Image (cartoon, rainbow, N blue to C red):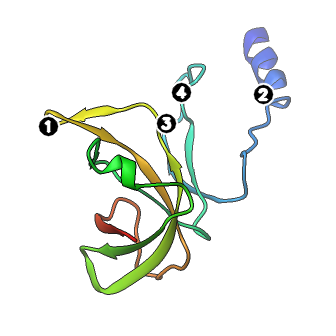
């Protein structure tokens, strides 16, 4: 019982802070599980702004892309939606995707649509 009391006392000193204002989109741990250092406890989402990440921009296409470049994003599931956006980051580390050298590009959308959901696929047209 002394260990339980000590654990409960220690728990009152625990505070979990988010790095930004947002919504808890998922809980990654279950009651009774031990959380390991570096293991996410929750997934936070900021639904006031959307970021699209490419996963198939090839080394051939990359030289034509630059930060600040305008894009148009069309979503496969929302055929009536096209949103403008801006390239905000180009990940310098490459990935191999189906034998091709590819790069991840992050795009901040200028607008949104209430029907957008995480994980939706999209086609990005670079301007």
Viewer-closest of 97 and 36? 97
Q: Which residue is mark 3?
A: 30
Which quadrant of the view contains residue 10? Answer: top right
For residue 49, above or below residue 112:
above
Q: Residue 98: give its label.
A: 1
As drawn, is 122 to the left or to the right of 46?
A: left
- In this view, the residue in front, 65 or 98, is 65
Tell me the CA gap for discs 1 and 4.
29 Å
Q: Is residue 7 left or right of residue 31?
A: right
Toward the front, the furthest residue is: 63
Callouts 1 and 4 close, C-beta under 8 Å: no
Measure how far apart labels 4 and 2 are at the Cα level.
18 Å
- What residue is at 74 percent from the left and 38 percent from the top? 16
Q: Nearer the viewer, residue 12 or 60?
A: 60
Residues at circles 4 and 2 in contact by the CB criterion of under 8 Å: no
| Spot occupied by residue 38 in the image (x, y as percentages of width and height) | 58, 24
Count all numbered tags in the image, as a single digit.
4
Residue at disc 1, secondary structure: loop
Element under label 3? loop
User: Which of the two labelled residues, at mark 2 and mark 3, occupies the earlier sequence position?
Assistant: 2
Marked residue nearer the N-terminal end (1 or 3): 3
* Residue situated in front as seen by the camera: 32 or 47: 47
Mark 1 touches mark 3? (CB < 8 Å): no
- Report how far apart the C-alphas of labels 3 and 4 lie in the structure: 13 Å
Q: Check disc 2 and report its element: helix, strand or loop.
A: helix
Q: Which residue is mark 2?
A: 11
Disc ID at residue 39:
4
For mark 4, give the secondary structure.
loop
N-terminal-most mark, 4 or 2:
2
């Amino acid at each position: 019982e002394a260990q339980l009391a000590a654990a409960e006392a220690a728990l009152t000193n625990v505070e979990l802070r988010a790095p930004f204002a947002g919504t808890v989109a998922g809980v990654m741990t279950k009651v009774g599980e031990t959380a390991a250092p570096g293991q996410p406890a929750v997934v936070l989402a900021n639904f006031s702004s959307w970021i699209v990440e490419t996963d198939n921009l090839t080394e051939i296409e990359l030289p034509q892309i630059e930060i600040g470049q305008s894009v148009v994003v069309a979503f496969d599931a929302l055929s009536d939606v096209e949103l403008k956006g801006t390239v905000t980051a180009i990940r310098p580390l490459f990935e191999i995707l189906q034998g091709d050298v590819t790069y991840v590009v992050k795009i901040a959308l200028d607008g949104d649509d209430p029907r957008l959901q995480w994980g939706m696929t999209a086609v990005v047209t670079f301007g």
